[in-house]
Image (cartoon, rainbow, N blue to C red):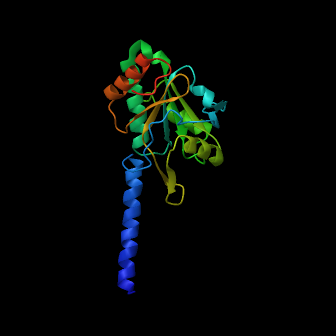
Amino acid sequence: MSRGFIAVLAVLAIAFAVITGLAVQRGILSPHPQQTATLGGPFQLVDQTGRPRDQHILEGKWTAVFFGYTNCPDACPTTLFALGQTEKLLGAKAADFQTIFISVDPARDTPAQLARYLSNDAFARHVTGLTGSQAQVDVAAKAYKVFAQKAGEGPDYTVNHSTFTYLMNPKGGFACVIPYNAPPQQIASQVQKAMAQGPNAESC
């Protein structure tokens, strides 16, 4: 096999990896979540105040669960802004709605860092940030079938990750997927449809 041919293969492999990483980051490629009521599961993390939290944080409210990180350049702030606008559109029903932001970059996302990041007035107000050890985050990501992979070296690395949001019902069960880049009006409509079905809703 010639060196030229090997070089071409190497370039193609790098290009494919870059394109795939960007596509996954934007929620375009698999893993796509399966519509299943069994999605989710136990986890042990801490919130932005350092308080231990587990899967029971989902109970009692309609919850938008999103995995991201505070150094995320686009998908995370866009989603958190949209969820903030969704709260406003829900009006009085916003009291029954919360956002859970689970970091896929626990090495940098300490509770203090999450607190600073989530204090942005443009983001959702009823939001809890969760982090922990890498092993603890991996357990949560696996339970929610979320892809996350570090990209690059040095302090400015990024993390390619799934960008869809899960709507969970007040029983802690899976209701539906909110697609990446969904406008606040669409998200609010999905939440309202789920609310209309009651606390055991499995669709929206």
Quadrant in which the C terminus is drawn: top left
**Residue placed at 39% from the left, 18% from the top?**
90
**Which one is in front, 123 or 146?**
146
Q: Residue furthest top?
A: 92
Q: Quadrant of residue 179?
A: top left
**Residue placed at 55% from the left, 33% from the top?**
129
**Residue placed at 49% from the left, 17% from the top?**
96
Q: Quadrant of residue 8?
A: bottom left
Q: Residue furthest bottom?
A: 2
Q: Position of residue 120 (x, y in %)?
A: 46, 31
Task: From the viewer's perspective, tell me whether residue 16 is left or right of residue 145.
Answer: left
Task: From the viewer's perspective, tell me whether residue 35 is left or right of residue 103.
Answer: left
Q: Quadrant of residue 89?
A: top left
Total residue callouts: 0
**Residue placed at 59% from the left, 41% from the top?**
140
Q: Position of residue 85 (x, y in %)?
A: 37, 25
Q: Position of residue 175 (x, y in %)?
A: 46, 29
**Which one is in front, 69 or 199?**
199
Q: Position of residue 128 (x, y in %)?
A: 55, 29
Vertical placement of residue 108 versus 42, above or below: below
Quadrant in which the N terminus is drawn: bottom left
**Which one is in front, 48 or 29?**
29
Vertical placement of residue 148 versus 166, above or below: below
